[in-house]
């Protein structure tokens, strides 16, 4: 993952959470769509949050499952510092600074989650990461990715991106923050949803589907066989 990505997210770390609802028009559905898939897992469940940033996705999951063990991984030191403050005093949280785009993952987990991180990777790195995630998941484990994807055709891809820009411009977010958001998206490397679902299947996931879609905001999941 490029140093420029780390730099830009370090710069926005302190404002990241408060800007999310302005930058993600479907914020509530986007972050909550996958939670019913996890509701019947036991109290000893272990979670890896890849590209965790400030820990926003983990925080939403923690509200429903406060006894689970959480490991938050991110390349941005400043983003992880915000996450550490968020979960200060909780002994079931650990934090790892790492570039998940090029390094193998370690550990063994029941659940792997990611939100708005994997779209920063080149396609080859996405393939490697999806294979690495499959390897560290325990049998019966699940991977959930809440992310942005490329439209299925040029027309729809342009439509989604144009609509998002218009929504952000009219969201009430201050101009400086909007400008920085538009600067960050230049680093995005969206991939088609169907291709990513197929890539998960090729990695070994036996049950794969998209469970939520709003424009180019999607949530998809893959289950590892028992």
Image: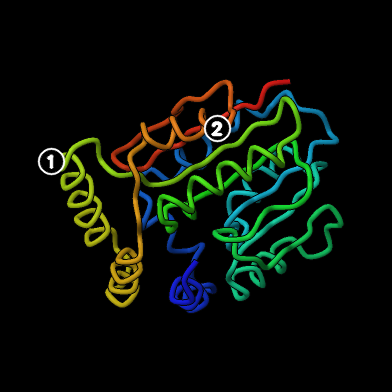
Horizontal and vertical percent for residue 25? 34, 48
Which residue does the numbered mark 1 point to in the structure image?
155
For the C terminus, the quadrant is: top right
Horizontal and vertical percent for residue 73? 66, 59
Q: Secondary structure at mark 1?
A: helix
Left-right relation of 28 to 140: left
Q: Is residue 184 above or below residue 57?
A: below
Rendered image: mark on residue 67: none
Q: Residue at x 78, y 59 (%)?
A: 94
Q: Is residue 177 above or below residue 190?
A: below
Q: Residue at x 43, y 30 (%)?
A: 198
Sort mark 2 into few (<14), some (14-19) or many (20+) by Cα contacts within 10 Å: many
Q: Residue at x 42, y 37 (%)?
A: 196
Left-right relation of 55 to 147: right
Horizontal and vertical percent for residue 47? 72, 44
Horizontal and vertical percent for residue 114? 56, 48
Rendered image: mark on residue 34: 2
Among the 4 quarters of the image, the one containing residue 43? top right
The reply to whether the C-beta atoms of the residues labelled 1 and 2 are less than 8 Å apart is no
Q: CA distance from mark 1 to mark 2?
A: 28 Å
Q: Of the residues tagged 1 and 2, which is closer to the observer?
A: 1
């Amino acid at each position: 993952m490029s140093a420029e990505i780390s730099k830009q997210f370090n710069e926005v770390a302190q404002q990241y959470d408060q800007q999310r609802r302005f930058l993600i028009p479907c914020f509530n559905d986007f972050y909550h769509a996958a939670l019913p898939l996890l509701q019947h897992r036991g109290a000893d469940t272990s979670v890896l949050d890849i590209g965790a940033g400030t820990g926003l996705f983990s925080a939403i999951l923690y509200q429903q499952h406060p006894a689970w063990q959480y490991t938050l991984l991110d390349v941005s030191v400043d983003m992880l510092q915000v996450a550490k403050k968020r979960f200060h005093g909780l002994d079931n949280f650990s934090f790892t600074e790492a570039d998940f785009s090029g390094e193998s993952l370690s550990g063994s987990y029941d659940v792997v989650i990611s939100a708005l991180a994997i779209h920063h990777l080149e396609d080859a790195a996405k393939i490697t990461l999806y294979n690495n995630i499959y390897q560290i998941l325990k049998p019966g484990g699940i991977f959930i990715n809440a992310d942005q994807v490329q439209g299925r055709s040029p027309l729809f891809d342009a439509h989604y991106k144009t609509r998002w820009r218009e929504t952000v411009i009219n969201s009430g977010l201050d101009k400086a923050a909007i400008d920085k958001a538009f600067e960050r998206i230049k680093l995005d490397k969206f991939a088609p949803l169907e291709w990513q679902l197929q890539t998960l299947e090729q990695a070994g996931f036996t049950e794969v589907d998209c469970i939520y879609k709003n424009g180019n905001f999607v949530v998809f999941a893959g289950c590892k066989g028992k």
